[in-house]
Image (tube, rainbow, N blue to C red):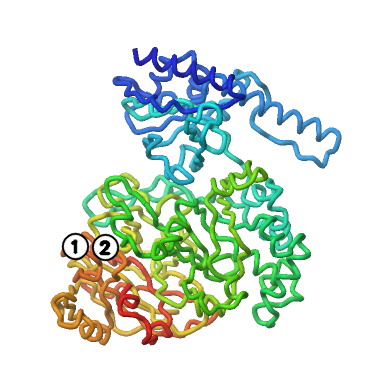
Amino acid sequence: MKQIKFKTMIMAAIATIALSGCKDYIDEGSRYTFTGHTVASFLEENEEVFSSFIEILHRGGRLSLMKAYGQYTCFAPTNDAVSRYLFEQDSIYWASVEANKLDPSNDIIWTGVTSPELSELSDSMCKVISQTHLLPAIYLTTDMEGDVIPTMNMNDRYLSLSFGVDEVTQLSQLFINGDGLIIAKDEEVENGVVHTLGRVLNPSTNTIPSQIKKHEYFHIFSEALEATGYDDKLQLYKDDSYTDGDKTEQNIDRSGERSPYPKNRYYGYTAFVEPDRVFNEAGIYSFEDLEERCKEWYPHNGETIDHTAPLDDPKNPVNQFVGYHLLDRKLAYSRLVCYKIVVTGYFESEKDLQSNSDRNEYYETFSGRLMKVTMPRTVPSLSNSILINFSKATADASEEQLACMNVVINEPDAFRDSDSLYVDFNGEALNGTIHTIDKILIYDENVMAGRVLNGIIRIDCSSLCSELTNNDIRWKHPGNRSTGDVYIPNNYCKNMRAKSEESMVYYLSAHTSWSNYQGDEMMTLGAFDFEYKLPPVPAGTYEIRMGYSANSKRHIVQYYIDDEVTGIPVDMRLLGNSPLIDWVKDSDTEDNGVANDKAMKNRGYLKGPTTFSNYGEYTAGKARDDNSTFRKVITTKYLSEGEHWIRFKNVNENDDGTAQFMHDYIEIVPMTFIRDESLSLEEKRK
């Protein structure tokens, strides 16, 4: 009966498509568990609907995989969808061939399809199509939130999500990759789930610059991108020289299990783009207008800004402007900050981060300047928005200063639906993501130092290396052991340098039972000596701290800044009851811990922040209440313009290779913040 019901439902869906002007829809009642079926056998039982896709899976070498044990999500296009796809792609190819005959300067568009007949489709193209529609994890439609499915498909690409309502039936709609509408959902089988699609998924092969140029409402920014040469810097996709993907390394416990190396090394980019309409509202109607305004926003000073420099020179004001819009990592909207990050069975960020604490991330841009991205949970009216360079210090700000703060990153669907001009907006490119913003993004050093970056700059150590984001390592569990550790080779990350080849660095996936910021941590074993590049804060004097969780398995570490030693080695095995730390719980003091804070600071320590919780080995509650969670003051130092590196060296003479250097996050705190007596105790303890 279930089989008959499914076939009837599909036929009804196809009929509805015809009657409603090619409108597909989701049948809200269509959810069944097909006991005894695999993905493959489910498709084969419904051959009259999926025979074309079955042939594609078979010739692409993936049909047998769909018969095997595992966890898979299959987006299965109907026969009609496959026929339409082949006809459309074939037409695009031959139209470009004819256009090239008339004008050889026109590119021939290679679609991979040169015939409308399925039998003429190459096996290699069948493999690409197959892997585009398969995910190595189970996702019901109830799990699909945000702008992407958080697990890459078998082509190592994210699938985007968008939502709508059918104008005729008023049923909810869920689109995959823009136009792949799910017409039957959540058909659960023994090794996964099947969703039926009314179109074949055809991910964009455009790189970020091509995707921006494709949309006519980004004309001004696209021209600036090309004029400054940044379009050439956003073309990389995959490092084919990386060949360690099949290797493993002993895990952190040396228990005999082994941790995987990263499977690949992909590049990724994020571009924050003003639509032409935003420029127009500021009186900018052409690239030439933008060039003149950039000279106002970035005044000539000879050292970092030179109005006579060519456009491809970092000192050129337009180059500074465009570079500040670009990041070296691919960030979907749902990954811009640590918000609703879920590692199934292990971690959920909303349980660990305090509900009234802002979600902050800090990213180095292509201009070498720091960007702050925030979901301001402390501001109810903005608590579900994401802003660039968020600041509450706006009361006495000038119009020019206000222009440099609180730039809203539009939700993908919100921008797409805001005007019929933008109905075709697709922010997902082959090698990155495009986000639209609601006003012009300008970097001003004085505003950043005085109003945006004038507090605790807390950076999760996994965020220091963009490769962990681009290769689906950060905030992911690789499937091995409970800690989910991934071995990071010494030459894998450009912002992490090994001074000793014996340095063994691991990423440990987020775990709710740990006293960690954002749940995850970095771990290092062996005779290590390595360093991270610090983010480029405005020039000034800062207190630099390291956040970590102590226990008996930890290390003795010597810290350096720019290869200068910063005091005596730190024994990370010591808990709060050590006289070298002298931690006392606030509730056990008469002054809410004020005197104890000063005593600890004199010893070079701070308690954990109040902005995240822990469910650690020694206590539960806010990190501040955990006598194993500390912030160690490394040094106070003037950080000038240019690169700065923080270095860590193993100085534990008794290390047998199992001692752990756990490093969770780095704090860079302006001395002006530390000395500001007008700030509340609550603000200082965040």
Question: At which x and y percent is residue 281?
Answer: 69, 61
Depicted 11 relative to depicted 422: above or below: above
Q: Is residue 332 visible?
A: yes
Task: Report how many numbered discs are placed on residues in the image.
Answer: 2
Q: Which residue is mark 2?
A: 613
**Residue at coordinates 74% horizontally, 28% vertically from top-left?**
94
> Label 1, label 2: how many angstroms apart (C-alpha)?
8 Å
Front residue of this view, candidates 437 and 192: 437
Which quadrant holds the N terminus? Answer: top left
Dot 1 falls on a residue whose secondary structure is strand
Q: Which amino acid type is marked by label 2? A: Ser
User: Which residue, given by chain and number where applicable, does mark 1 sit on?
Assistant: 620
Question: On the picture, is 411 further left or further right than 145?
Answer: right
Which numbered tag is attached to residue 342? none
Residue type (three-letter) at the residue carrying disc 1: Ala
Q: Nearer the viewer, residue 525 or 327?
A: 327
Along the line of sight, which residue is nearer the eye, 567 or 457? Answer: 457
- Judge the density around disc 2: few (<14), some (14-19), many (≥20) Cα neighbours within 10 Å: many
Please tell me whether mark 2 sits on a helix, a strand or a loop: strand
Image quadrant occupied by the C terminus: bottom left
Q: Is residue 164 above or below residue 445?
A: above
Q: Position of residue 371 (x, y in %)?
A: 52, 67
Q: Determine whether label 1 and label 2 are within 8 Å by CB.
A: yes
Looking at the image, residue 200 lies above or below residue 314: above
Determine the residue positioned at 81% across, 34% down.
99
Residue at 17% in and 61% down = 617
From where the camera sits, is residue 525 visible? no
